[in-house]
Image (cartoon, grey):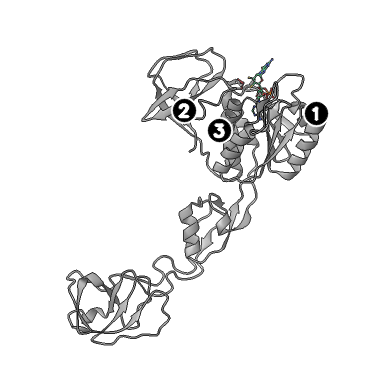
Amino acid sequence: MITVAEAKALIAENIFTLDAVKLPIEKASRHILAEDVFAIADIPAFRQSSMDGYAIRFEDKDLPLFVHGEMAAGSANALTIKKGETARIFTGAPLPDGADTVVMQEKISLNDGRISILDDRLQVGLNVRGIGSEIKASTLAMHKGSFLSPAAIGFLAGIGITEISVYPLPTVSIIVTGKELCAPGETLGFGQVYESNSYSLKAALEQAGIYKAEVISADDDLEILSRIFEQALKKSDVVLLTGGVSVGDYDFVLEASRLCKVNQIFHKVKQKPGKPLFFGMKDNKPVFGLPGNPSSVLSCFYNYVLPALYQMAHKNNPVKEISAKLTDAYHKPAGLTHFLKGTYKDGLATPLSAQESFRLSSFAYANCLICLDEDSDHFEKDTTLNILLIPE
Ligand SMILES: Nc1nc2c(c(=O)[nH]1)N[C@H]1C(S)=C(S)[C@@H](COP(=O)(O)OP(=O)(O)OC[C@H]3O[C@@H](n4cnc5c(N)ncnc54)[C@H](O)[C@@H]3O)O[C@H]1N2
Ligand code: MOO
């Protein structure tokens, strides 16, 4: 059996990053930019007012100015002001020819169609956005490797870009195995349990920006599972299986992966929960066999699957590891790394009750996994240890 660190290193070594694709910007949020993007035009493309007020020639600031015409946002009027003139102007509007400065409307007095300026801090060019003051045509707007946040998508739209090259997020198939599984909403028969793993995994994938994970149910039947597995490998970049990776007579994931010619990288990690974790590669597609207990599935997802999915998309691991102080003493047998469902606040980590791997009631409240070292058995209150922050 390998250690947690060895398992993480083996996954990182084997993962392939996906090739860049072109996407419309409205589909590119949360991706990593795969190319440098250059501005296609000066933005703003005209001298633009940043205030509601009056456009003036700065040199006329001490004169009473006759209000000659108006420029609103979107105005395409050709308007020119001459000596002794001003134009009413609104935020976002182009400056009339001749004007170089905008006075806020709160800083004038208006009498008989003429304004006097009451702004002793007025400077030439005040309240005017120059041509190209956001970005100049042909200059670098965003560099390759940038994370496309909502602001980045808005910025690209605002400079007229419609399509960009990004590293795609992987497509994922989820195969749930188990004859005992019953869909939530149906009445449980004897020996049945509600199927929950596909729900937690889909929710976790959606949080990572992967919205179209396909869920397929396979009975505890080698032939059916192998067929479904084969199809999933053709269809998706990553295959996740839940259940059936242990040593029972009806645990067919390992056998099915052999039939599908998946190259086994490891099976079993010195950890709890999730000891029978399986990882393999079929060509450049990773396969994770997640131990079926609902808590094991999610613990393995945050420890191994999510970092791998992000690596495929050229993204940094979203599961941050930090140190924290344990608020209560904890005892476990030595030999396995334990990941405890816990809460983290202000540097303190508190283990929750209900740590058994078939239970999710504590995971439902947890915001961290507390990592208890493989070799140790006792952890005093106030021990400093590592925790994984579950992405919110
Ligand atoms: N003799 C041994 N038995 C077991 C060992 C072992 O080392 N020796 N390991 C145990 C550990 S640890 C785990 S974890 C489980 C993993 O088993 P499988 O991956 O084969 O999972 P299953 O047996 O199919 O299911 C385990 C458990 O989880 C429930 N389950 C499965 N799928 C779902 C689902 N989609 N939604 C909700 N619940 C699900 C299933 O009903 C079982 O109760 O093996 C131990 N055994
Ligand atoms: O390790 Mo299993 O995942 O405890 O239940």
Label 2–label 1 contact, CB within 8 A: no
Q: Nearer the viewer, mark 2 or mark 1?
A: 1
Q: Is residue 195 above or below residue 124?
A: above
Q: Is residue 255 left or right of residue 181?
A: right
Residue 64 pos. (x, y %): 18, 83
Q: Nearer the viewer, mark 1 or mark 3?
A: 1
Label 1–label 3 contact, CB within 8 A: no
Q: Amino acid at mark 1?
A: Leu
Earlier-in-chain disc, 1 versus 3:
1
Give residue 222's mark: 1
Q: Is residue 137 left or right of residue 26?
A: left
The residue pinned by badge 3 equals 302
The N terminus sits in image quarter: top right
Quarter holding ligand 2: top right
Disc 1 crowd, CA 10 A, few/some/many (<14, 14-19, 20+): some
Q: Quadrant of residue 76?
A: bottom left
Give residue 152's mark: none
The residue pinned by badge 2 equals 387
Q: CA distance from mark 3 to mark 2?
A: 12 Å
Instruction: Give the residue drawn at x 39%, y 85%.
Output: 78
Q: Amino acid at mark 2?
A: Ile
Instruction: Give the residue drawn at x 34%, y 73%.
Output: 90
Q: Amino acid at mark 3?
A: Tyr
- Number of marks: 3
Residue 317 pos. (x, y %): 53, 38
Disc 3 crowd, CA 10 A, few/some/many (<14, 14-19, 20+): many
Earlier-in-chain disc, 2 versus 1:
1
**In this view of the protein, can residue 35 be seen by the observer?**
no
Q: CA distance from mark 1 to mark 3?
A: 28 Å
